[in-house]
Amino acid sequence: MAHKLLAAAALLLLCAASAQASRWSVETDEQGRHLLQAAKAPNCTRINAHCATCRNQRIPGTRRSELVCSSCASGYRLRRDGISKTCDCAPGLAMDGNGQCNPCTPGNFCPGGDAKVNPTNQESSCPSGLVTTFAGAKSQAQCFTQAGYGRVSTRGSNGKVTLSGVLCEVATYNVGSNTAGCQKCGAGLTTAGTGSTAASACLAPAGSYLDKGIGKLCQRGTYSTDLSSNNNCVPCPEGITTANEGSTTAAACSLALKGYYIDPSNSTLAIQCPLDTYQDQEAAVTACTPCPFGWKTKETGATGLALCLAPPGFELLGNAASISACPAGSYKADWNRNLCVECGSGVITAAEGSVSKDACLVPAGWGLTSLSPMVAEPCQQDTYGHDVDRVAVANARCTACPTDMFTLDTLEGRARNESELYTSEAACLVKPGWGTTSTIPQECPVGTFNEGNNRAPCQQCGTGWTTVAAARTSEDQCVVQAGWQMAVDGIPAPCDKGTFSTGGTELAPNATCTACDTGYSTQEDESTAVEECAVCAAGYGGSGCAQCPYGFFAYGGAKEGIACAACAAGSTSRKGATHVQQCYSTLIDARNDVFNLVDEAAWSDDNATTGDSCGTACTDSAACVMYKFVLDAAGDGSGQCSLLSEAGTPTHTVGFKIGNGDDYSVWGLTQSVGAALAPMPAAAGAADTEAKCKDACTAASECEVYVWQSGSSACSLTKSELEEAAISMFQVSGAKLYSDLHA
């Protein structure tokens, strides 16, 4: 057991010694002695300025070690030469004079440092015609073409591929910056020389033109003299052509086209054959050939004898030396060698040399009776033609007069003269008692007349006139129409509502209006029979259409038996009132407060204690003219009621204005009422009747009462006055209304 413990202790000591030894390094001094020193991190840049990591490596055959580089900095690579002490530039980089690696310059490539191939880490040049296009190129494979060069790859016997640049030959090009060879121009195209750098350098040679990327020969009549990118050739002068395609000079333009000739004094000028000549070759001719027989050409530049023709309106008769115009009554429409065509029997033309079937005319007053063959004849009775010669077409026939219209010979019962032609519808007339409406004939209706044998419309009898029957022929047959009467001025006037007229007769043409029975009326003006007096007149109603009583009204027009309408509660009207607006309140306020009296003793006290009961006391008395109510000082609405009664023997007629003078409530008193207007209107002073006095009050907006003294013919206008805590209202009774009193 003790031996085992000793062995374990020895092992621990050995391990500790070993660990301690790792912290030391052995170096040899100048005398070859081995020195034990403490270990420290190696300085790798002692090996190479770009060495990133290094290690001690034992020198073979010795007990010594030395530092070697394990890896280089970014952009560098360790040279694989077995020494491991050199950092070369990585591919794409080259070393400058300071030993620094920089990106390869554009145009060259840098394969990187190598002990055998590139120990100095220099840039390599691309083959002639090739360059790199960016900094940092790594191999010859990145050498692209310069513009105008193609790149060629050659594989040697050792299997190695070599690149070279080749100058582009004629008819080829390369835009550069690629790995392609030179590109061929399109078919028929070439270049001006070698080394072309773009497709645009591919041009059409002389005698051709560029069309969609290929060269085509110039067509006949054109030429080109040099390389060009034009998409067409130069045309020869007008009328001149070339013998072949692909002409390369202007001198090739030497032949006149058909329809042209070469100017004898200028071989580069071609002239169109003038009218009535032709030229049918492509040759160097200097004149055109005239057409025979006087034939014409339609246009200049005729290209053959076949274009020599007789123009429209002309023909070449047999054995004639020259063409002649179509005779009257015939035509020829086209350019050809045909004979003229006859229009037809009775059909004419305006002149010789007609050029169209449209020139064939039907004479004025004639019409076609046949279209094929074409035949025209004079129009017969009760028909008409045109007033001028017209084109002979299917509808150029005689036109029948409208129904119930006749030509004059028929109306007069005679034969038409041979020279008498009817040339328009104006020859169609109406018989007596008929007229036209928008040229349509009709029998003159009641109220109109026409003497006939004309195209005039039926004439209306004058306003208020009519006829007793249709088809009248004279104004003397007009009578006063029903619903009208002959007025005093000799002019018919319509019957008013409530009257009627049966009209005149041919024996007694005048008429008068007759009034309906009392209480009855018609619905409208111009009533024509007593049977139309079938409704109650305004202001009448109920059984027998009696007059509406006080407090009722009727608008009129209601059937018999319908009662008059009652005015609203608290209002009344005169007898025979015709409108609800004629219903007036039975008590109407003074505009201010009260109507004062000249003699205030005329008021009689009443025991009514409120304004309402005071008003009731007044309306309960048929003799009450008005009331005055004065409030007590207590302020509880109570007060003193006073009534003014109508006088038994009045000296003054007092009219209280209702509204703006729509009516007046009229009473008899012995004194004036209210305060006189100042100044008094002139109309009041000039009034010499009660009616004029009333009208003066109506005209004066501030007037509330007119006071008329019949004995003295005196008129005065008055109004109410302000009086604190007092009111005054006058009574309105149907029997006291001015409109009722003076009905």
Image (tube, grey):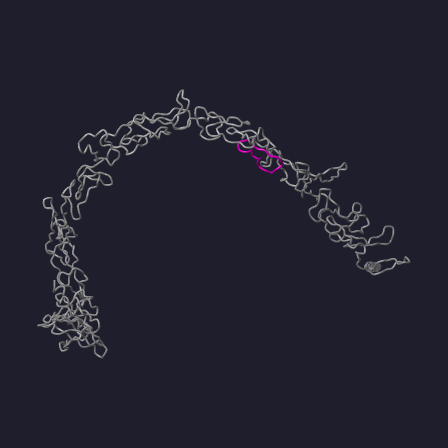
Rendered position, 520 above or below 160: below
Tell which residue pokes out farthest to the bottom in this image.
633
| For residue 113, side relative to residue 678 (left or right) | right
Asked whether 169 or 414 is in front, the reply is 414
| For residue 249, side relative to residue 10 (left or right) | left
Q: Is residue 1 visible?
A: no
Residue visible at 25% across and 35% down in the picture: 425
Res 192 quadrant in image: top right
Res 315 quadrant in image: top left
The x and y percentages for residue 227 are 63, 36
| For residue 169, side relative to residue 678 (left or right) | right
Rendered position, 436 above or below 270: below
* Region in magenta: 221-240
Residue visible at 52% across and 29% down in the picture: 261
Which quadrant is home to the N terminus? bottom right
| For residue 321, side relative to residue 516 (left or right) | right
Asked whether 261 or 634 is in front, the reply is 261
Which quadrant is home to the C terminus? bottom left
Rendered position, 484 above or below 455: below
Q: Is residue 35 visible?
A: yes
Asked whether 232 or 311 is in front, the reply is 311
Tell which residue pokes out farthest to the front in this image.
265
The x and y percentages for residue 199 are 63, 39
The x and y percentages for residue 245 are 58, 30
The x and y percentages for residue 510 are 11, 48
Residue 227 lies in the magenta-colored region: yes
Type of secondary structure dominating the magenta stretch: loop
Residue 191 lies in the magenta-colored region: no
